[in-house]
Structures are given as structure tokens and as C-alpha cells.
Image: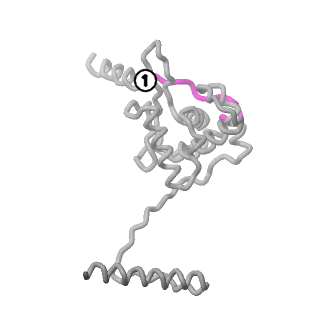
Amino acid sequence: MDRIAELEAQAAKLAAEIAALKAGKAAPPPSPPKDEVRVLQILDERRDLPNLDQMRKLFDIVRHRVPEQKTHDPDRPFRGFCAAARYVANCGRIAAPNNKYSLGWWLDDMTHWLRQRDAMTIDITSSSFIAAVLASGDILFVPHDADLGRVWEFAIVPPHHGGEPATEAWKRVVETGVVIRPSQPARLTEQRSQVRIYS
């Protein structure tokens, strides 16, 4: 019976709040107890991204170097590229391609990162991510090559996982229309360094 009384009291309280809201006399929300601690996640990110015209130029430079995105919406690839560029600009740069993360993993992490920041993610694809990497101008990468058994690798780590901050190398890409050349896969780089050590 105590549970019934408790629920009836809660129902009465909610009914009073609803009536106050309808009447435009809503009471302010209760303040938290003084000893309560609230932890909020700080979602910081870089703000020094290319402007819209520069993004369009970057996209025009790299769009034909990535797998084609089949879509009936001609603006969708550009929107996806802009969102991916936002994520890539916040990834830490490292010295060699990173074979610890697959392209699918990067897509999942990028989607999660953007959703945390209330960004639309419907337009992003793996092609968006690859295009943003190429447009950055400062990320070493290994392209997919089924004949050689190679998969996409990128010389970055996820945001807030170390690495060097992004540079403004994208400006060089805008000015010259040239992206950096592909690198050797991480496993080949490791094998060569071991040969030098033990020879």
C-alpha cells in the first residue's frame, strides 16, 4: 500500500506541474543539492578550418582520387567531405601509417565524434573520410590495393589520443592542387627497420 500512496503522490505532483506549465506559471527547476557534483564532458575541437570556398576547392581536388560515392543527391558527397574534414582536423598526426584501425573503424569513430557535437552524419561515408585525409595535406596514407593485399592505412590517431596537431598543409593543397604521395604500409616500414637493426 505504501508504494501505491507513493505513486499517487508522484502523479499528483506531476499533474500540478503540467497545470502550471499550461497556465504559463511553471516553477523553476529545483536546484541541485550543494554537495552534488556534476561532471560535464567538454567537447572541444579546432576552429581554424578552411572556409566554404576553400572546402569546395579542396573537394574538387580530391574527389576523383577516392572511391566513387553513388548517390542521387549531387551535394551529398561535398556535405560528407565537410563533416569528415572537421573530424580529420582534430585527429593527431603520427610519423607512419597506422595499421591498428580499419577504414570501417575510422568511419564508426568519426560518426560517433560528430554525433557528440550534434553534427549531421547521414552524408558521411568512407569516401568522405579518405577525401578529407587527402585534402589535409599532412597525413601519410596507404591506399587500398587488393592485388598487393593492402588496405587503407592513415598516419593519424583518434582525437585526444596523442599525436601532433594538424598543420595548415591544406593551404598548399588549395594553392597547388597537389596531394601527398602514398606511403609504404606500416608492416613494410617495420620490416625494413628490423632489417636495418639486425643486419
Q: Which contiguous range is marked in magenta? A: 173-185
Q: In the drawing, does residue 43 fall left or right of residue 6?
A: right
- Determine whether the residue tagged by mark 1 lies in a helix, strand or loop: loop
Toward the viewer: 164 or 113? 113
Say which quadrant the N terminus sits in: bottom left
Quadrant position of residue 101:
top left
Q: Position of residue 17 (x, y in %)?
A: 50, 82
- Is 171 located above or below residue 45 in the figure? above
Image check: 199 left or right of 103? left
Check if residue 10 falls in the magenta segment.
no
Q: Where 123 sits versus 45, above or below?
A: above
In front here: 53 or 31?
31
The secondary structure that dominates the magenta segment is loop
x, y percent for residue 199: 28, 16
Residue closest to the eye, 23 or 143: 23
- The residue identified by callout 1 is 185
Which residue is pictured at 68% across the width and 42% down the height? Answer: 55
Residue 180 falls inside the magenta stretch: yes
Question: Badge 1: how crowded within 10 Å, few (<14), some, or many (20+)?
Answer: many
Rendered location of residue 94, percent (x, y): 44, 38
Q: Amino acid at mark 1?
A: Pro
Q: Residue at x 49, y 25 (%)?
A: 142
Q: Residue at x 56, y 81 (%)?
A: 21
